[in-house]
Image (cartoon, rainbow, N blue to C red):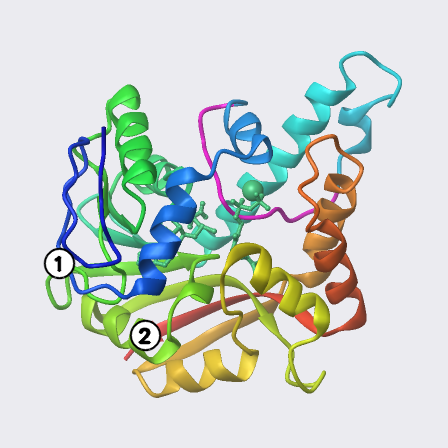
Amino acid sequence: MTSTDLSTGTGTSAGTSPFIPTPTTPYQGDIARYWDHEARPVNLRLGDVDGLYHHHYGIGDVDHAALGDTEDSAYEKKLIAELHRLESAQAEVLLDHLGAIGRDDTLVDAGCGRGGSMVMAHQRFGCKVEGVTLSAKQADFANRRARELGIEDHVRARVCNMLSTPFETGQAAASWNNESSMYVDLHDLFSEHSRVLAVGGRYVTITGCWNPRYGQPSKWVSQINAHFECNIHSRREYLRAMADNRLVPQAVIDLTPATLPYWELRATSPLVTGIEEAFINSYKDGSFQYLLIAADRI
Ligand SMILES: C[S@@+](CC[C@H](N)C(=O)[O-])C[C@H]1O[C@@H](n2cnc3c(N)ncnc32)[C@H](O)[C@@H]1O
Ligand SMILES: CC(C)=CCC/C(C)=C/COP(=O)(O)OP(=O)(O)O
Ligand SMILES: [Mg+2]
């Protein structure tokens, strides 16, 4: 059994994942508990397709030919495979923006979830990947997958606050947040990435952010915050907090049009969770954007 009390910062992990005792807040304790108890079919059944378990959304056009006829008895299986393909395509695009990574490099995945992106990064670059998550269950899951794949000496998840990591200053060639930056203060987050990254290293985030052009967070954005107990930041906050922490954007890509097909397909699936309408409506009314930002550590 694993017991980790992140609400007090005095946790212990009887699981296999090393616990790094760093200061945590009551909020972070809530988030640790949230992810320790998460077991949604929309995540587990998609991960079961090929063993890459993601907690992020998808991008790209739906392959209707691969889906075939909705009346077909195999349609549900094909639908799950297609949603999973789009989620893995999202992670591939994030990795595309990490720059030239060598086998001897170390990458940091801040808020690594069950580790799908870490495995993909190692498989692509042959490098070491260090992940941190607040959830002991997620870290154990990610480390178990790494052992099953025989890559545990290259891919490791730890229970740790991403705002205060055990990594050495300048240790990482690149680092990222894949849909995990809406749980933290952005100045604190980018200060820590900036510390851990080598000068000339690359930081990438894919995130949902509210659009300052809309004015304030819309009711749909508030609904997404309540659903996930997170705090979605504005696009402006990202760019300002990066500028304040020696992270200079090289690419800012609006992935909103690319993620809508994923959501529209997901809304037709038996795996809906009830949050689909909020994403679709906020992307369509312009109040919310799905953004990739790649920045150089100068
Ligand atoms: C939506 S999931 C994304 C997981 C992963 N990046 C992916 O793409 O599959 C959010 C993750 O952020 C992590 N997280 C949130 N706040 C954190 C913090 N302060 N320190 C470390 N991890 C955190 C959660 O534990 C969870 O693993
Ligand atoms: C873009 C935004 C605002 C993301 C919020 C963070 C989040 C919960 C991402 C998906 O996790 P998940 O894969 O566990 O969620 P779901 O169960 O909905 O697939
Ligand atoms: Mg999901």
In the image, what residue type sits under mark 2?
Phe
Is disc 1 placed on a helix, strand or loop?
loop
Q: Quadrant of the C terminus?
A: bottom left
Q: Residue at x 24, y 54 (%)?
A: 6
According to the picture, the residue beneath numbered tag 2 turns out to be: 190
Residue 22 versus residue 54: which sits nearer the camera?
A: 22
User: Which image quarter: residue 190?
Assistant: bottom left
User: Which image quarter: residue 169?
Assistant: bottom left
Tell me: is circle 2 under 8 Å from ligand 1.
no
In the displayed structure, 244 sits above or below 232; it is: below
Along the horizontal axis of the image, is 296 left or right of 258? Answer: left
- Ligand 3 image-quadrant field: top right
> Mark 2 or mark 1: which comes first in sequence?
1
Q: Within 10 Å of the Cα at label 1, are there few (<14), some (14-19), or many (20+) other Cα atoms? A: some
**Residues under labels 2 and 1: Cα distance?**
15 Å
Tell me: is circle 1 under 8 Å from ligand 1.
no
User: Which image quarter: residue 257?
Assistant: bottom right
According to the picture, the residue beneath numbered tag 1 turns out to be: 166
Is disc 2 placed on a helix, strand or loop?
helix
Q: Is residue 182 magenta?
A: no
Q: Position of residue 24 (x, y in %)?
A: 23, 63
Residue 259 in view in this figure: yes
Residue 148 versus residue 18: which sits nearer the camera?
A: 18
Q: Is residue 55 magenta?
A: yes
Along the horizontal axis of the image, is 111 left or right of 252? Answer: left
Residue 247 versus residue 102: which sits nearer the camera?
A: 247
In the image, what residue type sits under mark 1?
Pro
Highlighted range, magenta = 50-61
Q: Residue at x 27, y 69 (%)?
A: 193
Q: Residue at x 32, y 42 (%)?
A: 125
Q: Residue at x 35, y 35 (%)?
A: 123
